[in-house]
Amino acid sequence: MKLVVEPELAQVFDYIDWVADNSSQMDPPDPVGAPEVTAVLRELYDLLLFGKITPEQAAVEFRERANAILGGK
C-alpha cells in the first residue's frame, strides 16, 4: 500500500531528504568560559595595537587570565 500525500507535503518530504543528504554534523559547542576568554583576547589585542603593552606582556597576561577563566580560578 502506497501512502498518497498532497503535492505540497511531498515537497516538504523531498526537502527534508535533500537536507539530510547535503548537511554535516554541527560543530561541538564552545567550552564554558569561551566568550570571556575571547573578550580578554580582544582587550589585550587593542592594548597591543595602541602600544600600551608589548607582545610578550600580552601573551603572559592572556595565558594567566584565560587559565583563570577556564580553570575556574
Image (cartoon, helix red, strand yellow):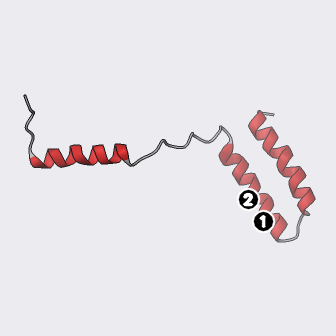
Q: Residue furthest top?
A: 1
**Residue at (9%, 40%) from the top-left corner?**
5
- Place residue 71 in its image quadrant: top right
**In x, y percent, where is residue 12?**
21, 46
Q: Which of the pair 66/1 is nearer the observer?
A: 1
Q: Which of the pair 22/58 is nearer the observer?
A: 22
Q: Residue furthest bottom?
A: 50
Image side of residue 71 versus residue 16, left or right? right
Report the quarter where the N terminus lies: top left
The secondary structure type at the circle numbered 2 is helix
Instruction: Tell me which amino acid carries mark 1.
Output: Asp
**In x, y percent, where is residue 58?**
87, 57
- When the figure is inspected, residue 12 is found, relative to residue 57, above or below; the finding is above
**Mark count:** 2
- Place residue 51 in its image quadrant: bottom right
- What label sits on residue 19 in the rendered view? none
**Residue at (84%, 47%) from the top-left corner?**
63
Whether tag 1 and tag 2 are in contact, CB under 8 A, the answer is yes
Q: Which of the pair 38/26 is nearer the observer?
A: 26
- What label sits on residue 42 in the rendered view? 2
- When the figure is inspected, residue 29 is found, relative to residue 1, above or below; the finding is below
Instruction: Tell me which amino acid carries mark 2.
Output: Arg
Image side of residue 58 versus residue 25, left or right? right
- Place residue 30 in its image quadrant: top right
Circle 1 packing at 10 Å, graded few (<14), some (14-19), many (20+), is: few
The secondary structure type at the circle numbered 1 is helix
- When the figure is inspected, residue 20 is found, relative to residue 71, above or below; the finding is below
**Residue at (81%, 39%) from the top-left corner?**
68
**In x, y percent, where is residue 29?**
57, 40
Q: Which residue is mark 1?
A: 46
